Amino acid sequence: MAYLWAEDDFDLPSDVEKLGLSNPISGKKYVMYHGTTRQAAQGIMKNGFRQSSAGMLGPGVYLSRDLNKASRYPIDCPEGNRVVIKVVVRVGKVIAINKQGHPQQKTWHDCGYDTAWVPPDCGMVKSGLEENCVWDPERIKFTKQINPVPVKASAGSGARGYKQKKMPRKPRERGTWHIMYHGTTWDNADIIEEYGFQPSADGLLGQGVYLSKDLDKAMLHPFQARKADKVVIKVKVNVGKVFIIRHRYHPCVKTWHDNGYDTAWVPPDTKVLKHGHEMDCVWNPNRVTFLKLIDVFPD
């Protein structure tokens, strides 16, 4: 069985920093992820996180700002029995541990630091993905549990390595077909190409397949992925009946489908999204036709 992990697209609280792979700034708050088993997740939600007794960075709670990395853990656990816990972390004073044998690799907390950060592609982690170790579990606030979504449907074909120029925005029309884009990783794109899209369980606009007519926006996603791992899927969408969301507190922001609509649309520059791009959420994946893969960051 193949699985997909939902990719969030949302406005962060005003005091929480954007997802990314740059050096965490001391004193800030960040969204992070922790991969574990379903059984262990129940204990964490009930009793909170506890320090690991040991690890690459010594005692602490191990997290990552990379959802793809967190979804791989525990490595020896079947994917269908894994979950990812999404949290907000007050990182406190941060130290970067950028090589094996760093003099503070396991003694950083004794030196007055609250969080140790391993940068991506520094040679410390085989996957090349970033990692964080937070000493005090009280700095971690649980927000939600992310479950893997099994994929079943079929889809068309594509070609890796295809390059394409940016597409301009087009006027929105009800009941018509539109070219749109979905940013993801190469690994997830292979699954989508074979089995089709699956709706995210949740997001800014609720359940659905998140897309954009703006190639620039699609290229941003997943926020936490390295450029070399990113790819954009070009699709054709039968939008059906369209509902417009112009502000984040719209009363139907997550119930538009219950009112008979097929697609929710966030217009550009409405301040619903901080970056000002437009966004679409399509309820039924059968309205989305896979066209091809676009290598947006070719070697």
Image (tube, rainbow, N blue to C red):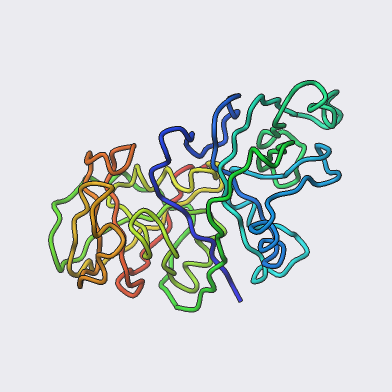
Q: Which residue is at 72% across, 33% downward?
A: 122
Q: Specify the farthest residue to the top.
A: 111
User: In the displayed structure, would residue 24 be above or below residue 61?
Assistant: above
Q: Quadrant of the N terminus?
A: bottom right
Q: In the shown orientation, is residue 173 left or right of residue 162?
A: left
Q: Where is residue 61 in the image (x, y as percent from the top left)?
A: 73, 44
- Nearer-the-camera pick, 285 or 90: 90
Answer above or below: position of 198 versus 264: below
Q: Which one is in front, 90 or 218? A: 90
Q: Where is residue 163 in the image (x, y as percent from the top left)?
A: 40, 48
Q: Residue 60 is drawn in which quadrant?
A: top right
Q: Is residue 158 left or right of residue 227?
A: left
Q: Is residue 261 left or right of residue 135?
A: left
Vertical comparison of 80 with 179: above or below: below
Q: Position of residue 277 (x, y in %)?
A: 29, 42
Nearest the camera: 260 or 118? 260
Decide if residue 95 is on the left or right side of residue 262.
right
Quadrant holding the C terminus: top right
